């Protein structure tokens, strides 16, 4: 029988104040400031796009808001699934394959919102990352000082770093991260005290191919460089599914606890972002009036050639075809 301690689920709720703030920001669109500038035709026969630029910015903010809320819903789905698994393994897992299949389906459902380590993609400005685990070289155990070299044959580059005697895990991560920073490779510590290297997916071959390590015979054998194959890190839900299928009690306990804490932190961060987006929406919509915009745009387009004015509008405001159609839907 596998028994897990129940996790404290306080602080994770589907309703949040930040959602109300964001919703209030969106609802501000109904409040009209009649003093806003009217559209005017310039000497080149084009339309002043000041208002449309504001609406384009409003659209960007709302897109970010939608992405953040979608990511929050995905995180809530993950958390609820973890709670269900927690209860199941606390009694006894009777259908491990069924739970495994459910996790795989959940992984597919959240793929657009969350990365393989369950981090919201909307919070990252970086390109999709591929992660690799250094699971055959132990850099975290307390050992004497050593200088280690790494050669990435595919990239044609090498780095060296010195690990002092008795270095802590945090110090090891910092030292290796500083050495690999010029190669745009991120470094973190895996839950199993293994080094995790991150790189843009388009450059993942640099770490997918064997990396050559050389040392002084303490952590790495002295002499000729040793080829080390890094392991591509699996999706966290895939790892959990495999542990459940193999009935790995300790791993399941540790992983569920870690994942729940990480999901809680991500949800809190997302709710803060949603709240900030709501404030941005209020600022952008304080002078917005879609009805006046439609009327004024219609009047402007009726004066002269529609095609040239539409081209000018698109060029100045850089708004999408869908946005233009939406604005003109009552005047076509």
Image: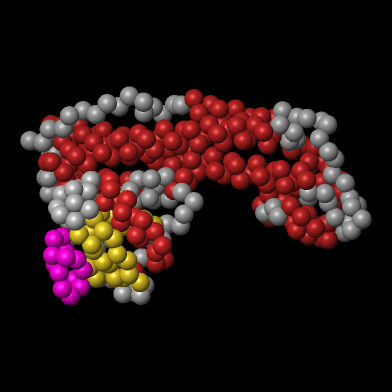
- Residue at 59% from the left image edge and 41% from the top image edge: 62
**Left or right: 281 in relation to 301:** left
Q: Is residue 70 visible?
A: yes
What is the x, y in percent for residue 326?
70, 47
Q: Nearer the viewer, residue 9 or 330?
A: 9
Q: How many marks?
A: 0
Name which quarter of the figure residue 83 lies in: top left
- Residue at 89% from the left image edge and 50% from the top image edge: 41
Assign the N terminus to one quadrant of the image.
Answer: top left
Q: Is residue 131 above or below residue 66?
A: below
- Residue at 36% from the left image edge and 26% from the top image edge: 11
Q: Nearer the viewer, residue 143 or 198?
A: 143
Is 226 magenta? The answer is: yes
Q: Nearer the viewer, residue 58 or 223?
A: 223
**Left or right: 317 in relation to 111:** right
What is the x, y in percent for residue 205?
34, 69
What is the x, y in percent for residue 270?
45, 37
Q: How is the image coloured?
A: secondary structure
Q: Is residue 81 visible?
A: no
Name which quarter of the figure residue 255 lies in: top left
- Residue at 40% from the left image edge and 35% from the top image edge: 267
Bounds of the magenta segment: 214-229
Name which quarter of the figure residue 24 lies in: top right
What is the x, y in percent for residue 310?
79, 56
**Left or right: 22 in relation to 314:** left
Is 16 magenta? The answer is: no
Q: Is residue 224 above or below residue 73?
A: below
Q: Is residue 157 above or below residue 4?
A: below
The chief SS type of the magenta part is loop
């Amino acid at each position: 029988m596998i028994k897990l301690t129940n996790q404290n689920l306080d602080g994770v709720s589907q309703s949040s104040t930040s959602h109300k703030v964001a919703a209030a920001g969106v609802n501000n669109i109904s409040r009209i400031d009649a003093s806003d500038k009217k559209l005017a035709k310039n000497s080149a026969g084009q339309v002043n796009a000041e208002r449309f630029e504001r609406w384009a910015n409003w659209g960007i903010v709302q897109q970010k808001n939608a992405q953040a809320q979608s990511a929050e819903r995905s995180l809530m789905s993950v958390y609820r699934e973890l709670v269900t698994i927690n209860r199941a393994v606390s009694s006894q897992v009777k259908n491990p394959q069924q739970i495994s299949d459910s996790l795989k389906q959940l992984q597919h459902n959240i793929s657009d919102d969350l990365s393989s380590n369950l981090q919201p993609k909307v919070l990252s400005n970086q390109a999709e990352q591929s992660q690799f685990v250094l699971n055959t070289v132990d850099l975290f155990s307390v050992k004497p000082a050593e200088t280690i070299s790494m050669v990435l044959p595919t990239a044609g580059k090498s780095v060296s770093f010195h690990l002092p005697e008795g270095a802590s895990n945090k110090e090891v991560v910092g030292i290796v991260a500083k050495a690999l920073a010029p190669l745009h490779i991120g470094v973190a510590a895996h839950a199993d005290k293994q080094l995790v290297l991150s790189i843009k997916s388009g450059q993942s071959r640099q770490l997918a191919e064997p990396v050559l390590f050389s040392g002084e015979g303490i952590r790495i054998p002295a002499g000729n460089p040793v080829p080390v194959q890094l392991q591509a890190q699996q999706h966290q839900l895939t790892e959990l599914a495999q542990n459940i299928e193999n009935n790995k009690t300790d791993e399941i306990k540790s992983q569920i606890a870690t994942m729940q804490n990480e999901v809680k932190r991500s949800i809190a961060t997302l709710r803060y972002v949603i709240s900030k987006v709501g404030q941005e929406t209020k600022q952008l919509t304080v002078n917005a009036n879609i009805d006046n915009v439609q009327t004024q745009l219609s009047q402007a387009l009726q004066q002269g050639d529609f095609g040239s004015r539409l081209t000018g509008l698109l060029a100045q405001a850089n708004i999408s075809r869908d946005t233009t159609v939406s604005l003109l839907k009552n005047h076509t």
